[in-house]
Amino acid sequence: DVKVTQSSRYLVKRTGEKVFLECVQDMDHENMFWYRQDPGLGLRLIYFSYDVKMKEKGDIPEGYSVSREKKERFSLILESASTNQTSMYLCASRSTGTDNSPLHFGNGTRLTVT
Amino acid sequence: GQNIDQPTEMTATEGAIVQINCTYQTSGFNGLFWYQQHAGEAPTFLSYNVLDGLEEKGRFSSFLSRSKGYSYLLLKELQMKDSASYLCAVRKAGTALIFGKGTTLSVSS
């Protein structure tokens, strides 16, 4: 079974802090993704990576950056946290083996910025 | 542009059948996915359609019409545990999925 692990379930940070959200997958998947989920807005794609050291902007990349130094790990970085980044953050991974390969999600990190 | 629309909320009773619709307008299409998400949990994969027609998987079926930009998820013999959000997502050319806002289904006895 695919396991996607996010390092923290809950985080509370102050405005202006640099925040790291970590995600690790154990299935040797090429693709990894960061989404945020907000009530009434659904899941929105922040960044994704299709290979080590490769990254692509999603629909809402502003205020975020990412790092993928190893295949199994994909980090989301908030350079200077703001209150509008309070959200549930979901990491996902996917194999490129077949077209119908689904995304496998981690359990999420609920980030509160005060 | 891209737009994926689903109803916000639906209610149904145990044992009934419910159909959750999804319409999409996206620049590129490479498959449509349905996910289930229980409150406080991660989304889990339900179904995938890339060709027109119906895909059946137990109590759940999913339909796609590419010419109409339309899909539905059909849930039969509803159970209380089916109370959840159902997310429609389109994969454009490439690898990323774009999600609709989700439909919250409440099943009552």
Image (spheres, helix red, strand yellow):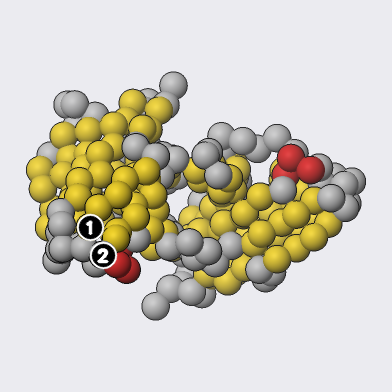
In the figure, residue A103 lies in which quadrant?
bottom left
Q: Residues within 10 Å of mark 2 (few under 14, many from 20)?
A: few
* Residue under the point 19% across and 56% down: B75
Residue at 36%, 28% in the rendered image: B26
In contact (CB < 8 Å): disc 1 and disc 2: yes
Q: Look at the picture and state if A36 lies above or below B38.
A: above
Residue B107 place in picture, x, y as percent: 30, 59
Q: Residue furthest front?
A: B109
Residue A110 visible? The answer is yes
Q: Position of residue A89 (x, y in %)?
A: 62, 54
Do pointers 1 and 2 mark residues of a single chain?
Answer: yes
Instruction: Tell me where residue A30 appears, x and y as whole percent.
Output: 48, 59
Question: For numbered disc 1, what is the local secondary structure?
Answer: strand
The residue that appears at 28% across and 37% down in the rendered structure is B22
Residue sitting at the far bottom: A1
Which is nearer the eye, A44 or A2?
A44
Q: Quadrant of the N terminus of chain B?
A: top left
* Of the pair B26 and A95, the residue shown nearer to us: B26
Q: Is residue B28 above or below residue B107?
A: above
Residue at image x 22%, y 57%? B13
Which residue in the structure is indicated by mark 2? B109
Q: Height in image: A64 above or below A14? A: above
Report the side of A50 relative to B18 (left or right): right
Amino acid type of the residue tagged 2 in the rendering: Ser
Q: Which mark is residue B13?
A: 1
Q: Chain of mark 1?
A: B
Q: Position of residue A43 (x, y in %)?
A: 51, 45
Q: Is residue A72 visible?
A: no
